[in-house]
Amino acid sequence: MAKPRKFASNLTAPPEADPGQRVTKHRRVYDHLLADIQSGQLKPGDRLPSEAELGRLFEASRITVAKAVLDLQRIGLVTRRPGAGTHVQGRHPVPGHTFGLLIPELGLTEIFEPICRGMMRTSFARPDALLWGNASTSTREAAKEAEQMVHSFIAQKVAGVFFAPLELNGEKDSINRRIARALERAQIPVVLLDRCYMPYPERSAHDLVGVDNRRAGYMAAAHLLGLGTRQLAFIGEEHSANTVDARITGFHEALRRFGVIPDRNPVWRGSPEDETFVRAMIETAHPEGVVCASDLTAARLMQTLLSFGVRIPEEVRIVGMDDVKYASLLPVPLTTIHQDCAGIGAVAMATMLERLEHPELPIRDVLVPVRLVVRRSCGAHLERSSREL
């Protein structure tokens, strides 16, 4: 076992958070420790700073610090030892492990590349090989390649497969089930990335690592409602993953929490690039704010609305999901729900290794925390300006 290190003399103040993001002290403690674990600065067996040390560093209460450490413990990154403090959890793969990466949309969405990097760079697991196919250029090609790749993984007798189920394809449900059944017949452990392939809220018999999408939908809608926006709509594309259904559930919960009863169904399914669809939504729902199923949906909706001459956020406020790299670079910087993709990757690897070591464990949902990132598209700055007048 690695000898615990002392940290009292090595603690450095964390970087100042962007005030526009309203990062809580709990989140700053969590992110700081997570970054140290992922970078290798804190290695397996190392002792974390005490709650008192962290409290002084972040000017936070011990309750706040304890909650952040508990969140790390819940996702398997640290372990508490009575009388010895909290230590980084060790993960040591058996030499010769080869894992398959079955991510049909690797070349189509931005979230999976940082997830893969998180898997490869995590300090507590270094598999001999991660096998993956070429990035796809369309959902049709992605589906075809995924079914071919799963048989290749089975033939190569990989130790486990990380599977991000296909979406945005009318046949996705049957394709995803065929892939899962093939891996089950081969008795290859599966860790699902980001989403389950079963219709929400049903659940498959495999571990899943992602975020609490129901909470994410609630946070996005509650933010707009908290700014005084009452006429809300939710937009997502047809044949989306079940994560979108979970986000819609959270969206409805926020409406109920704020006592908002829509005159009609506020959920719209269609392409945000389809001008006819978007115009129908605007003319029928008259939304003051729109929660989008993803940042890509939000970006496309923003372009369509701007082409109509709609002012964002003065006339329509927008919130997205994911916080991809281009979110802050859109014509109106996008308020969105940030998910820690690298963290998802690191935790996915830890989950796979634990599944291999302890196959009798119950099936788990391991959810990495999300946070709201406030930019101009939600109009929060307009509220601040009006209060200052």
Image (cartoon, grey):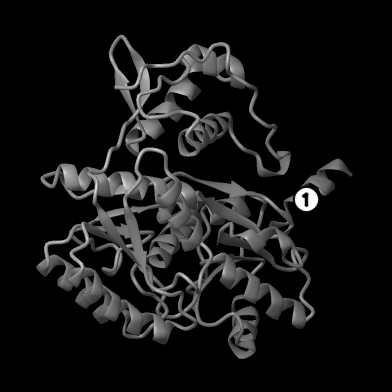
Name above or below for residue 95 compared with residue 155: above
Name above or below for residue 372 compared with residue 168: above
* Left-right relation of 272 to 154: right
* Left-right relation of 260 to 20: left
> Which residue corresponds to the image point at 60% horizontal and 56% vertical from the top-left?
336
Residue that label 1 marks:
381
**Quarter of the image where one finds residue 221:** bottom right
In the rendering, at what x and y percent does residue 89 appear?
33, 30
Q: Dot 1 lies on which element?
A: helix
Query: Which residue of the protein is positioned furthest toward the bottom in this rendering?
Result: 276
Name above or below for residue 312 compared with residue 206: below
> Which residue corresponds to the image point at 72% horizontal and 66% vertical from the top-left?
330
**Residue type, numbered disc 1:** His
In this view of the protein, which residue sits in the foreground, 139 or 197?
139
* Left-right relation of 218 to 281: left
In the rendering, at what x and y percent does residue 68 appear?
46, 29
Q: Residues within 10 Å of mark 1 (few under 14, many from 20)?
A: some
In the rendering, at what x and y percent does residue 79 appear?
32, 26
In this view of the protein, which residue sits in the foreground, 29 or 160?
160
> Which residue corresponds to the image point at 23% horizontal and 43% vertical from the top-left?
354
> Which residue corresponds to the image point at 58% horizontal and 86% vertical from the top-left?
277
In the rendering, at what x and y percent does residue 84 appear?
33, 12
Query: Which residue of the protein is positioned furthest toward the top in this rendering?
Result: 83
